[in-house]
Image (cartoon, grey):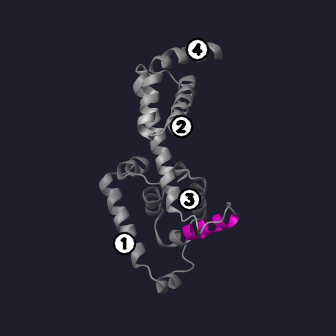
Amino acid sequence: MPQVSVTSFYESLVEPHLDDLRRYCFFLTKSKWDGEDLCQEAILKSMVYFRNKEPHPDVKPFLIRVARNLWIDGCRALKRQRRLNPKSLPASCHDSDYAEVRSLIEWIGERLPGRNIEMLLLSDYFGYTMQEIAETTGSTVPAVKSVLFRTRSLLREISIDSVRKTEGAKVILFDVERWSKAIMRDLPPCL
């Protein structure tokens, strides 16, 4: 199908629902400008989806779901940014940021299994819910709760003396690199 016909087909599907989508985006953001940005992102994301896949029979719920998911992703990214103390961070990102993140991940990697680290990062850094972590890792919610509880307990128990005793423990560098890049790029799927 030529590009023009795909675009016009998409427009004919989406156009009747644009006012509802705008109102929903304004409801989520409580801001005219942010709502308009969210609406445009949702339209763009759905257009890319429609170009590559079969269109959904119910376009309006699909558009609302796309907008909602984009809003949730934006809120999570903002929450992660707020956790960082802006006074302690340099004005621009340097390689030292990566070195600090990597050394922290190596330190954790020497003391915890990979599965525990991934669940801890998804929960505490990326802000995933227990259900989302379970779906992402192919686990159950009770298993995720148990792993996170044990991991946090273990991290609380580690003291300065135990840090010195465990230096030289075996850590898989590929995993450390993957986890560090996921944090630096703010991309949880890299875990």
What residue sits right under mark 2 in the picture?
33
* Residue 63 visible from this viewpoint: no
The amino acid type, in three-letter code, at marker 3 is Trp
Badge 4 marks a residue whose secondary structure is: helix
Side (left or right) of 3 relative to 122 = right
Judge the density around disc 4: few (<14), some (14-19), many (≥20) Cα neighbours within 10 Å.
Answer: few
Q: Residues within 10 Å of mark 3 (few under 14, many from 20)?
A: many
Magenta residues, as a range?
95-106
> At which x and y percent is residue 41?
55, 34
Circle on res. 8: 4
Q: Which residue is mark 3?
A: 179
Question: For numbered disc 2, what is the local secondary structure?
Answer: helix
- C-alpha separation, residue under disc 1 versus residue under disc 4: 57 Å
- Type of secondary structure dominating the magenta stretch: helix
Q: Is residue 32 magenta?
A: no
Amino acid residing under circle 4: Ser
Mark toward the start of the polypeptide (3 vs 2): 2
Q: Comparing marks 3 and 2, which lies closer to the viewer?
A: 2
| Cβ–Cβ under 8 Å for marks 1 and 4 | no
x 47%, y 50%: residue: 76
Q: Nearer the viewer, residue 16 or 31?
A: 31
Q: Nearer the viewer, residue 132 or 10?
A: 10
Picture residue at 53% right of the left edge, 57% below the top:
81
Per the image, the residue denoted by label 1 is 153
**How far is mark 4 from mark 2, CA to CA?**
27 Å
